[in-house]
């Protein structure tokens, strides 16, 4: 089974629950993970605390937890700032439209945008999970440009056909979709996998 070198970027878009569930899901996939570098933007920490009612420092520290290594958003000396580190994929979840726009323009103002730029130039997998509605023409054009550059846009649009009973289960449908796109093997609902279809 392949073991991935993955980067997780968490930005300040509403939807901190997606970032939290992504990290929790990855902790259960350590047999498929060689290493996981995690970067929170400063706004992501504030939104996390506001939406989830908990201090993100508990997640961010200590700097190393198992195969997880947490980096500061201004740490351009981290491995993910260079293509030579050989990461396989990066998921930005949730992804603000500001972050998405900077990546589309090639503007690397922090470690998240720099790492994303590296993934694109190295032709590696970059998955962006935007949490915004509605989209402006600028948003759509930026997503089009990134798709043409090789990124995957995976909007935080949960699915309902698995009949999720909780907010966490609903949000997990997005997280599992992103991880499946990244190549991870998951036990998750797949359309057509049950007889309870309409």
Image: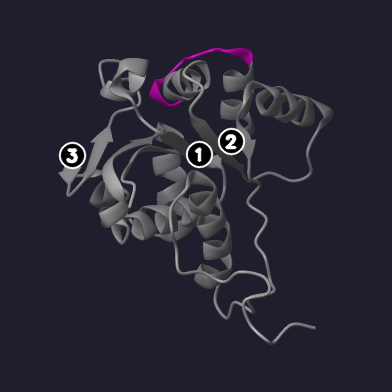
> Label 1's element?
loop
Choose mark 3 or mark 1, whichever is in front.
Answer: 3
Instruction: Write down the quadrant of residue 3 in the picture.
Output: top left
Q: Measure the alpha-carbon separation of dots 2 and 1.
A: 6 Å
What residue sits right under mark 3 in the picture?
A: 63
Label whose residue precedes the other's in the sequence (3 or 2)? 3
Q: Residue at x 16, y 42 (%)?
A: 64
Q: Residues within 10 Å of mark 2 (few under 14, many from 20)?
A: many
- In the image, residue 70 sits, relative to residue 158, either above or below, namely above
Label total for image: 3
Question: Which residue occupies 31% across, 62% down?
Answer: 28
Q: How is the image coloured?
A: one colour
Identity of the residue furthest to the front in this view? 1
Membership of 74 in magenta stretch: no
Residue 82 can be seen, yes or no: no
Q: Relative to residue 38, is residue 63 drawn left or right?
A: left
Residue at the spot 74% in from the left edge and 82% down from the top edge: 197
Q: Say if mark 2 contacts mark 1, CB within 8 Å.
A: yes
- Is 120 located above or below residue 133 in the figure? above
**Residue 54 point in image, percent of width and height:** 35, 58
Q: Is residue 194 left or right of residue 185?
A: right
Q: Look at mark 1 in the image and give the residue it sits on.
A: 12
Residue assigned mark 2: 96
Residue 150, percent across and down?
A: 62, 26
Q: Is residue 109 above or below residue 31?
A: above
Residue 34: horizontal and vertical position, in percent? 25, 43
Residues shaded magenta: 105-112
Principal secondary structure, stretch drawn in magenta: loop
Check the image and name the residue furthest to the bottom. 196
**Neighbourhood count class around disc 3 (C-alpha, 10 Å): few under 14, some 14–19, many 20 upward:** few
* Sequence-earlier tag: 3 or 1: 1
> Residue 26, percent across and down?
35, 54
């Amino acid at each position: 089974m392949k073991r991935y070198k993955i980067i997780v970027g968490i930005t300040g878009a509403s939807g901190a629950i997606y970032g939290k569930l992504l990290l929790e899901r990855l902790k259960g996939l350590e047999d498929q993970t060689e290493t996981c570098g995690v970067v929170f933007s400063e706004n992501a920490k504030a939104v996390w605390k506001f939406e989830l009612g908990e201090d993100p420092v508990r997640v961010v520290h200590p700097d190393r937890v198992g195969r997880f290594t947490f980096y500061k958003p201004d740490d351009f000396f981290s491995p993910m700032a260079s293509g030579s580190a050989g990461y396989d994929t990066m998921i930005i979840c949730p992804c603000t439209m500001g972050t998405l726009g900077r990546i589309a323009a090639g503007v690397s103002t922090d470690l998240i945008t720099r790492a994303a730029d590296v993934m694109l130039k190295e032709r590696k997998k970059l998955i962006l999970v935007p949490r915004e509605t509605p989209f402006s023409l600028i948003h759509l054009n930026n997503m089009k440009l990134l798709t043409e550059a090789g990124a995957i846009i995976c909007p935080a649009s949960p699915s309902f056909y698995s009949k999720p009973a909780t907010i966490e289960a609903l949000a997990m449908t997005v997280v599992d979709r992103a991880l499946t796109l990244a190549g991870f093997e998951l036990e998750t609902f797949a359309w057509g996998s049950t007889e309870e279809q309409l």
